[in-house]
Amino acid sequence: MESLILIILIIIPGSWSGNWRVTSGDQCALKGSSVVIKCEYDYPLDHMVTAVGWSKTLYVSGKRRRFLLSRLPSPPEHFVYVGDRWSDCSLQINDVQHIDKGAYFFTFETTLNTWTSKASARLSVRELTTVVEPSTVTEGDNVRLTCVSGCPTPINIVWFRDGQRVSNSVFQAGREDAGSYYCAALGQETVRSASVALNVQYLPENISISMDPPHVVEGSSVNLTCSSAANPAAHSYTWYSQGIASSVSSMLQVGSGQVLSLPSVDASHTGLYLCQAANQLGENNSTEVLLVIKRKNPDGLSLLILAGIGLSVLVTLVLTLLLFWLKQRTRAENKQAVYDSRLSGRGLSSLDPSDSVNANIYMLPPSTPSSPPPVTATQDSAPHSQRKSHHEHDDPPAYEDEVTYSTVTITPRNPSLPHHMNNSRVLRDSWSKAGENDDSVIYASVAKSS
Ligand SMILES: *[C@@H]1O[C@H](CO)[C@@H](O)[C@H](O)[C@H]1NC(C)=O
Ligand SMILES: *[C@@H]1O[C@H](CO)[C@@H](O)[C@H](O)[C@H]1NC(C)=O
Ligand SMILES: *[C@@H]1O[C@H](CO)[C@@H](O)[C@H](O)[C@H]1NC(C)=O
Ligand SMILES: *[C@@H]1O[C@H](CO)[C@@H](O)[C@H](O)[C@H]1NC(C)=O
């Protein structure tokens, strides 16, 4: 019997005092981590451990009660006894949650007794906390990331931004550094802090103007829309314009708001446009865009109308000219008839009708009544003197409205006739007669061809 006890003493390690005792310590665990509550127990030499178990104090209806862990609803492998049946009573808790905090007790049974720890092992559950200083920066500012653990045990941590590893916890903020940061325990990345945003602000940039529609025709409406990338978003927009034909060399403010509406454009709207976007940090300009207003193309109908108008003008002109020409022709024929009848009435019927008679008729405009008649033969000055006296006596001013000058060349068949005298007299008669009957006067001089 003594030798058996000796063997047992040799096999069981640790400081075995032989008193009833459980020794465990308080623990701090980070949420999501695994923690081991270290524990040792002791009992008199002549006892054999038959059962071990852990329990936890819970408050039910305001009363403090102890529950065996095996009776608590928990995921499998959440509580794992990592001790033994001799002296180690350690308990491992996996994926610690806030609900796991509290007071834990170890109980063991021996062949002769049951013993429960007098002092509890207290578990506190903490978290990692990320601090971003400052959390809102302007591009170029320095940023410091700090990871605060709620438990005193030092741990190695790593940084993540939007799920991607970040190597530095102190840096100069660029636009690309904006995002959600969290720290995590190295090797246990389920142990992590909540995310904290870093806000990197910058002036409006990539400011662009879009035009609706692209092609702008006179009279149509145009919307120019200004868009920009800015943080914080642009809160105001100002429009500037410079007419292409404007004498002003600088741009003038022409509107505000993200959309510049030009309800009815004309050629004066052609020019350079730019928009200025502003946020809390300041303002920036878009590049200038050229707005070109196209002239309206006449459509098919207008072309037809134009063609119609053109055609009718042409026809009217031609008809007018034709009528005018016919009238003049008739008048000239009348004069010729009077002349011919005078000639035959004075015994000049021997003249062959085929004799050449050339008549040049000049219509004078009202404003130039005194232009001299073209004279092809000047042997006889009678027509001039006759005209003069006629004018001096009874010419009303309106009389000169239609003055017809005529040059007549007659080639008679019989050369012995004193044409000179006869013709002059005949013409004098015909003038006076014509002047009485007609509102036109014919001045004529006759040249003998042979
Ligand atoms: C102004 O906008 C232009 C064009 O987007 C950009 O290149 C420039 O960096 C901006 N200026 C500032 C001070 O951000
Ligand atoms: C321009 O915008 C106004 C109102 O924002 C809208 O009524 C109009 O139809 C738009 N014009 C064009 C050409 O998009
Ligand atoms: C501005 O435009 C450039 C080129 O397209 C792009 O790389 C950049 O991300 C844009 N900036 C912002 C703030 O969107
Ligand atoms: C933007 O354009 C306006 C008009 O030309 C000018 O007065 C202003 O100084 C410009 N601002 C910047 C930041 O270039």
Image: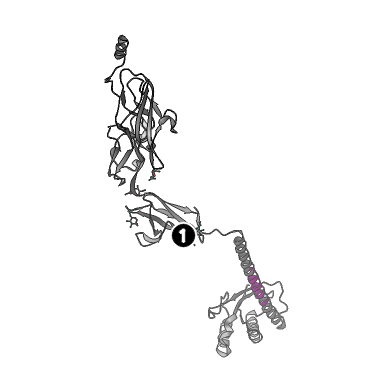
The answer to whether the beta carbon of the residue marked 1 is less than 8 Å from any atom of ligand 2 is yes
- State which quadrant residue 39 falls in: top left
Position of 168 relative to 323 (above/below):
above
Q: Is 394 placed left or right of 151 in the picture?
A: right
Q: Which colour scheme is used?
A: one colour
Between 440 and 60, the residue placed more toward the observer is: 60
Residue 25 belongs to the span the image colors magenta: no
Q: Is residue 292 visible?
A: no
Please tell me whether residue 330 belongs to the stretch shown in magenta. yes
Residue 428 location in percent, x, y? 63, 84
Give the residue at mark 1.
261
Which quarter of the figure has residue 125? top left
Q: Which amino acid does label 1 sit on?
A: Ser
Image: 350 above or below 230: below
The answer to whether 281 is drawn above or below residue 363 in the figure is above
Query: How far across and down, in percent of the image, does residue 225 sit?
Result: 44, 54
Exactly how many numbered labels are in the figure? 1
Name the quadrant containing residue 148.
top left
Residue 312 visible in the picture: yes
> In front: 310, or 25?
25
Across and down, in percent, residue 374 comes to 56, 75
Q: Write down the region rendered in magenta.
A: 318-331
* Residue in view at x 28 percent, y 23 percent: 19
Q: Which secondary structure is most common in the magenta stretch?
A: helix
The residue at the point 61 percent across, 58 percent down is 300
The image shows residue 103, relative to residue 335, as above or below, that is above
Q: How packed is label 1: few (under 14 Cα within 10 Å), some, or many (20 or more)?
A: some
Quadrant location, the C terminus: bottom right
Percent x, y for residue 86?
34, 19
